[in-house]
Image (spheres, rainbow, N blue to C red):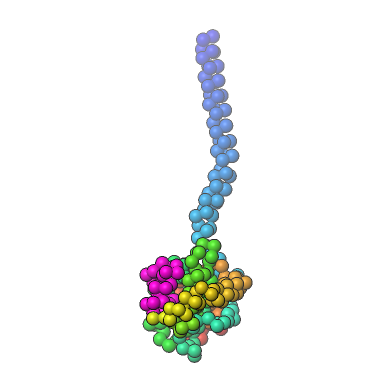
C-alpha cells in the first residue's frame, strides 16, 4: 500500500513536470513571433533610418565611403536634364564634366565633400570639371542653412561667391549674422552693400526656388549631385566620383 502511494506521488510529480514543460513550450512558441517582430522593428530603427533615399527612383545608391558600384547594364543609367539656372558656376564653360550639386551649408556631409573630395577632383582633372552650386537647405533640421545660402548669394553680388562659399564650409565662424559679417570683412566686401543685401532678404527667393525645384525633382537629402545628368547621392569619396568621371571622359556611358 505504501509502495502504491509512493508510486502515485511520483506519477503526480511527473505529470506536474510534464504539464509545466508543456506550458513553457507553449509560452516560448507564443513569444517567438513577438521576438521576431521586435527584432525587425529594432533593426529598422537602427539601420532603416540610416538609408538615404535616392533623388529620382531609378538611381542606384552607393553607400558613403564605399566605392561606387558600376551599373550592371549601360542602358540602366539615366541622365536628368538638370538646368544650371542662374546659380554660381566654378570652372571653364567648355569643361566636359559638369557637376550640379544640391547642398546645404549646415550639412556636415556637404562640408566633408567640399573639404576633401572637391579639391582632389580639381587637382586630378584640371580644366575638365565645372561645378554648379544649387541650394537645398534642410530647414527642418538646419535653421541656419537658408540665411547662410542667402549670405553667400549676397557675396556673389560682389563676385565673391566662391570665396564666401569656402569660408562658410570652413566653419571658422558661426553660421549667424555676425559670422557672415566677419567673412565679408575678411574678403574685403563693400560692407554697406553686403549688409543691405542681407537685411533686404532679396536673395531668399533664389534659395527657395532652388529648394523647390530639387524637391519637385525628388531630391530628399544632401548632398545630391548630378554628374553630366547622372545622379550621385551622398558625400561619396573621391574614388566614386573618379570612376564615374573616367567613364564619362572615355565615352563608356551612353
Q: Is residue 214 visible?
A: no
Q: Quadrant of residue 160?
A: bottom left
Instruction: Tell me if residue 126 comes above or below residue 70 in the rendering.
Output: below
**Farthest top residue in view:** 1
Residue at 41% over, 77% down: 184
The residue that appears at 49% across and 77% down in the rendered structure is 196
Q: Position of residue 17 (x, y in %)?
A: 53, 26
Q: Which residue occupies the foreground of this view, 115 or 39?
A: 115
Pick out the residue farthest to the front: 192
Q: Position of residue 106 (x, y in %)?
A: 46, 67
Range shown magenta:
162-187
Q: Residue furthest bottom?
A: 94
* 98 lies above or below 110: below
- The single residue placed furthest to the right in the displayed view is 216
Q: What x and y, as percent, mark residue 35?
A: 54, 44
State left or right for residue 66 relative to residue 19. Answer: left
Placement of the N terminus among the 4 image quadrants? top right
Q: Where is residue 49 drawn, in percent x and y?
A: 52, 58
**Residue 20 appears in the picture as rendered:** yes
Residue 229 picture quarter: bottom right
Please count the marks in the image.
0
Q: Nearer the viewer, residue 1 or 118?
A: 118
Residue 171 magenta-highlighted: yes
Amino acid at each position: 500500500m505504501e509502495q502504491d502511494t509512493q508510486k502515485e506521488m511520483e506519477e503526480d510529480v511527473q505529470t506536474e513536470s510534464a504539464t509545466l514543460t508543456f506550458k513553457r513550450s507553449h509560452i516560448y512558441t507564443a513569444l517567438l513571433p513577438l521576438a521576431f517582430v521586435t527584432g525587425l522593428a529594432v533593426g529598422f530603427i537602427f539601420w532603416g533610418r540610416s538609408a538615404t533615399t535616392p533623388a529620382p527612383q531609378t538611381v542606384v545608391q552607393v553607400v558613403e565611403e564605399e566605392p561606387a558600384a558600376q551599373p550592371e547594364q549601360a542602358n540602366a543609367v539615366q541622365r536628368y536634364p538638370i538646368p544650371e539656372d542662374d546659380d554660381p558656376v566654378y570652372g571653364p564653360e567648355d569643361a566636359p564634366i559638369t557637376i550640379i550639386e544640391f547642398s546645404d551649408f549646415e550639412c556636415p556631409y556637404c562640408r566633408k565633400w567640399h573639404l576633401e573630395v572637391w579639391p582632389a577632383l580639381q587637382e586630378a582633372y584640371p580644366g575638365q570639371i565645372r561645378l554648379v552650386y544649387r541650394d537645398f537647405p534642410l530647414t527642418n533640421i538646419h535653421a541656419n542653412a537658408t540665411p547662410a545660402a542667402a549670405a553667400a548669394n549676397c557675396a556673389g553680388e560682389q563676385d565673391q561667391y566662391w570665396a564666401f562659399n569656402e569660408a562658410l564650409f570652413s566653419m571658422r565662424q558661426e553660421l549667424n549674422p555676425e559670422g557672415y559679417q566677419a567673412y565679408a570683412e575678411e574678403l574685403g566686401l563693400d560692407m554697406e552693400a553686403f549688409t543691405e543685401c542681407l537685411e533686404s532678404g532679396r536673395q531668399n527667393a533664389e534659395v527657395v526656388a532652388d529648394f523647390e525645384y530639387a524637391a519637385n525633382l525628388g531630391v530628399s537629402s544632401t548632398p545630391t549631385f548630378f554628374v553630366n545628368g547622372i545622379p550621385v547621392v551622398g558625400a561619396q569619396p573621391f574614388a566614386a566620383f573618379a570612376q564615374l568621371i573616367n567613364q564619362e571622359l572615355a565615352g563608356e556611358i551612353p
